[in-house]
Image (cartoon, rainbow, N blue to C red):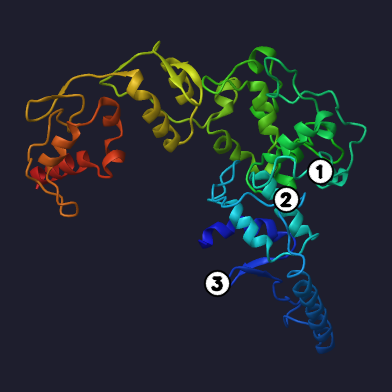
Amino acid sequence: MPRQLWKSIAVLLYHTRYVIVDSQNFPREPPFIGVGGNGGNSQQEQQQQEQQQEEQNNQTSSSSPTSPCSICLDGSQPISSSDVPFAYSNNGGLTCNDVVSAASAVSEGTETCQRMQLAGFQGGCCGESSYLVTPESFDRCPLCPQGEGVAFLPFKEIPGTASSTTAPLLCSDLRTNTDAIIDHLQRYVKDPGLCEDTILRRSAAWCGCFGASIGCTLCNGEILDQSSLSRTHPLTRMSCEEMVYQVALFDSDRCSDVTSFLQFDPNALCCPLSEIGTTTIPCPLCTEQQEFIVDNTITTVSYGDVTCGDAQAAANLLTSDQVCTDLRLEFSNQCCLETTAHNSSGSSSACALICPDTGEGPNDLFLTDPVTGFSCDFWVSEYAKLTASQCVDAPYVFGFDAVSFCCNTQITGDNG
């Protein structure tokens, strides 16, 4: 199994002092680290520590072979040959098989095993009802770890949970509604198998649980009016009211992660721009040489029917160059009107290798890149094969910046 896949599993083992070691990746206790300048204690204390360590190892070795951890809490068999990455979040390729393999070296009933069972449930490795099969299962990862307290808000709505036929969930549903609990336990921000990272536990502060406090706020905590709360994302249709809730799920030391989690800057949509700064980047879907068809309607798998205007409005909220590139590849082909350009050979094409300083093609078509072995004449012909939308990302498509090579090198040569 690739070593990088175990980085995600290591999270499941961290809090119980297991680490992933050696080429077989079996978990074991870390070595004792003494306190003090000499790095250890007396010989008698060290012997006692070694004896305790040996007893713990004996307990582990005697229990692991006879009662290995089953990631399915109800005792059912996990889905066979499950090499599909987890259904929620990005885990560097973590699969159900990875969790099953790691669980085989862990004893049933341990805290580590419980974390792996939660991870298996989150990854869809067992039946949906396999995790919450007994009353005590609800106590493993409750909404309010320290109790509800007097400030608990049972009738506060969970934004984004309403549908055309159902009312929105309430905070009380996250305590008593099995379907709601399952849904909020399955989803997490970053780390599978950690109760603290589930959307359920992260909702504790939103619902007013005792001892929980909201770490991050939208618009620097400014109270938004109903007009601002009702604004929606142009593509996902997520409302600013739901974004207030989504932002509140993050701890105070991870507020900067909100934009990467949502993949756009919610402040740019929901907050008064005169008071709140944004981190958005320019992301035009079309080039200056293309005509933008603002009212063209496109049917998409992810967003349904949207207009090109919606797509550009969404692009204006982005903070990532890669997400911008992905959005261009998805929409520019249908939103940008193909225009005719002329390359240096005089043929017409939707794309051409044009030097920005001269507005014309390269002068030296026989100039050859020593690494790729291709001449500028070759790149001119390759550019001519692209559509206008592909032309925007030609260096990304080819993996080579032919404009910089064929134009800048030529200028350097002229100046020399």
Instruction: Locate residue 372, reporting x and y percent.
Output: 19, 51
Residue at 70% of width from left, 15% of height from top?
165
User: Eyeballing the image, is 53 above or below 249?
Assistant: below
Q: Residues within 10 Å of mark 1 (few under 14, many from 20)?
A: few
* SS for dot 2: loop
Discs 2/3, front: 2
Discs 3/1, front: 1
Question: In the rendered image, which residue does mark 3 sit on?
Answer: 23
Mark 2 and mark 1 residues within 8 Å of each other at the beta carbon: no
Residue at 70% of width from left, 24% of height from top?
161
Discs 2/1, front: 2
CA gap between label 3 and label 1 equals 37 Å
* SS for dot 3: loop
Q: Nearer the viewer, residue 62 or 398?
A: 62
Name, please, the residue furthest toward the top: 295
CA gap between label 2 and label 1 equals 12 Å
- Amino acid on which disc 2 is placed: Ser
Circle number at residue 133:
1
User: Eyeballing the image, is 329 above or below 112?
Assistant: above
* SS for dot 1: loop
Circle number at residue 76:
2
Instruction: Locate residue 371, reporting x and y percent.
Output: 19, 54
Instruction: Locate residue 72, reporting x and y percent.
Output: 72, 51
User: If you read the primary sequence from the N terminus, does the residue marked by circle 2 or circle 3 appear first?
Assistant: 3
Residue 278 in view: yes
- Amino acid on which disc 1 is placed: Val
